[in-house]
Image (cartoon, rainbow, N blue to C red):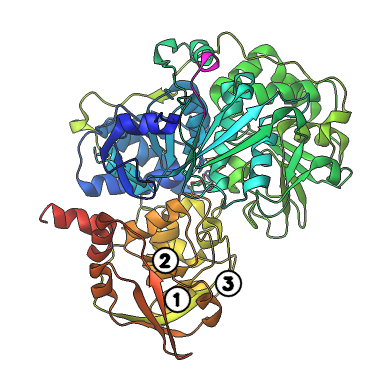
Amino acid sequence: MGYTIAEKIISSHLIEGDMSKRGSEIALKIDQTLTQDATGTMAYLQFEAIGADRVKTERSVAYIDHNTLQSGFENADDHRYIQSVAKKHGIYFSRPGNGICHQVHLERFGKPGKTLIGSDSHTPTGGGIGMLAFGAGGLDVALAMAGAPYYITMPKMVRINLTGKLSPWVSAKDIILEVLRMLSVKGGVGKIIEYGGEGVATLTVPERATVTNMGAELGASTSVFPSDDVTKAFLAAQGREEDFVPLAADDDAVYDEIYTVDLSSLVPLAACPHSPDNVKPVSELEGMHIDQVCIGSCTNSSYLDLMRVAAILKGRKVAENVSLAIAPGSKQVYTMLAQNGALADLIDAGARILECACGPCIGMGQSPNSAGVSLRTFNRNFEGRSGTADAGVYLVSPETAAVSAVRGVMTDPRSFGDYPNIELPLRFFTNDNMIEPPAPDGKDVEVLRGPNIKPFPLNVSLPKSLEKKAILKVGDNITTDHIMPAGSKILPYRSNIPYLSRFCFAVCDETFPERAKAEGGGFIIGGTNYGQGSSREHAALVPLYLGVKAVIAKSFARIHMANLMNSGILPLTFEDPADYDRISQGDVLSLPRVREEIEAGSPVTVEDVTAGFTFKTVLSVSGRQKDVLLAGGQLNYISRKNGK
Ligand code: MIC
Ligand code: SF4
């Protein structure tokens, strides 16, 4: 029996487990890691707590791209901490201004056939160049840097065959929006999505990366494209042809699910508020009033994307009612636009050029006006994420965004005229002068810590029984942006858990932090796909700080579930989802034999003391994860293992 692309990479990196058993735990050797600054500070604090010296990976890179709005000392201090800790421990440091981690990593470091984990959920962007790349919590990245394997549940294999060729004005974003429409934000959970078929060869590496990037929104473990002549040409154009290896699925590879997307019949699409799978054809929204257009983010800020945008804007003007903001994805892209004059076309048309960073995508500025409509080439349009609670964000392609910015209303770009014919250059402009290599020997490097860095919470080993209130009950598809919101006002405190805790679940219930404190913690009741979205482990560390002992949900998103376990918070699923309806917020729940039941691997009994009924929950974890939970989280588990 042949292998899929993912199975080939897994088999060459397998350290533990049986990859033929889908759904069982396997451990992978990790070749590369990346961090960004919003999760990086915590990841490096944990790396230091593990007590490792130099990183054991082939390449680890620390990027500064999220917290670049420096309206106080906090972000600048954290950047300085990351810079010094990276230098000391053998990590490359991509300075602020050099670009968004995923875009820069694709350009300068990504290698087909390698494994990558990153403390950011969009790390699967690397799948565009044939890497097996996973988003992970900061602690898992810290462990991988220290040489530990990365544990995942062996996913199911899904194949999406691409047939035909995209029509003019339809682009990579429309492919992934179509897949989201087909499969939904839960459709990829427990699966690796592989792309194949004749349509693959028609897509450049940055276009493939747009598709794998938003595989995160499907909830997929990761997504991957073959490594072929197109990949080789991209690497050669980046001056890295030696990094090329070919990679394709075997003809007799076995997939659990197979779908077909006909590129020729795709039309421009938009994900409507407030979910990336709420997809409609742009033609159905034609003429809708818009207030803002933002172009950029790790999904759509490549050279190709912005050259198309520049061609659309050239000699035209941004409509009077629209504010257009553009953030190039990397210094490479930005420099090339400046060199060939396209930047002048953007500026002249009235675009507001932002630095190469995440910017508006994570609410770092450019929040829309009240009840504003914002078209964004980004990947997430969760409620409140833009920084304006009642704004409506539509996710669209750069073509739809640029044409609509000129017309002043939502516009199907196919009505605009000739499609700009932009090709990737044979040679990108490369200058890695903003990527600092680590010190050859870090012993003398002093790590610089600012006053914003506060100790992170540690759990205690699991007690015999638990009795607490259900302090919050929420619905389906709760995102980490609900649990631990981001944005310019909160993000500077990613290394200050006590401060962050004031905003926990504020989108759902502003009283939650105070209530949680008053009750001395408790349980959270959730629906399906609880914790989808970001990899931020703060969505587990902050609830831990507030005393949350367990989340009882219908199902969990992969990265968040791993983060809960790393923090020692029990991720319990309802054996019978109907029990969800019987619990009310405020009920006292008792888990009388929780430790014993988990040790025995049996279902965990929960008594709703207030409503007077008993139900069962399941902890679907491996033996290792069970031990981590019994120990009260990953760091306690490691120190116990090390006999400390
Ligand atoms: C996001 O897009 O939500 C983020 C901000 O990049 C997060 C990471 C974080 O919360 O710092 C992610 O996607 O993992
Ligand atoms: Fe940055 Fe947005 Fe990409 Fe997250 S999704 S890494 S915030 S650009």
- At a point 62% along the width and 53% down the height, the residue shown is 385
Tell me which image quadrant ligand 2 sits in.
top right
Magenta residues span 225-231
Question: Disc 1 residue type?
Answer: Ala
Q: Using the image as rendered, state which of residue 10 and residue 336 is in the foreground.
A: 10
Residue 167 is covered by the magenta coloring:
no
Q: Marks 2 and 1: in contact by CB < 8 Å?
A: yes
- At a point 32% along the width and 32% down the height, the residue shown is 11
Question: Disc 3 residue type?
Answer: Asp
Checking the image for residue 509, the label placed there is 3
The residue that disc 2 covers is 543
| Residue 221 horizontal/vertical position (percent) | 46, 44
Tell me the quarter of the picture where residue 345 sits.
top right
Specify whether 611 is left or right of 400: left
Q: Using the image as rendered, state which of residue 449 and residue 554 is in the foreground.
A: 554
Label 2: how many residues lie within 10 Å, few (<14), some (14-19) or many (20+)?
Answer: many
The residue that disc 1 covers is 516
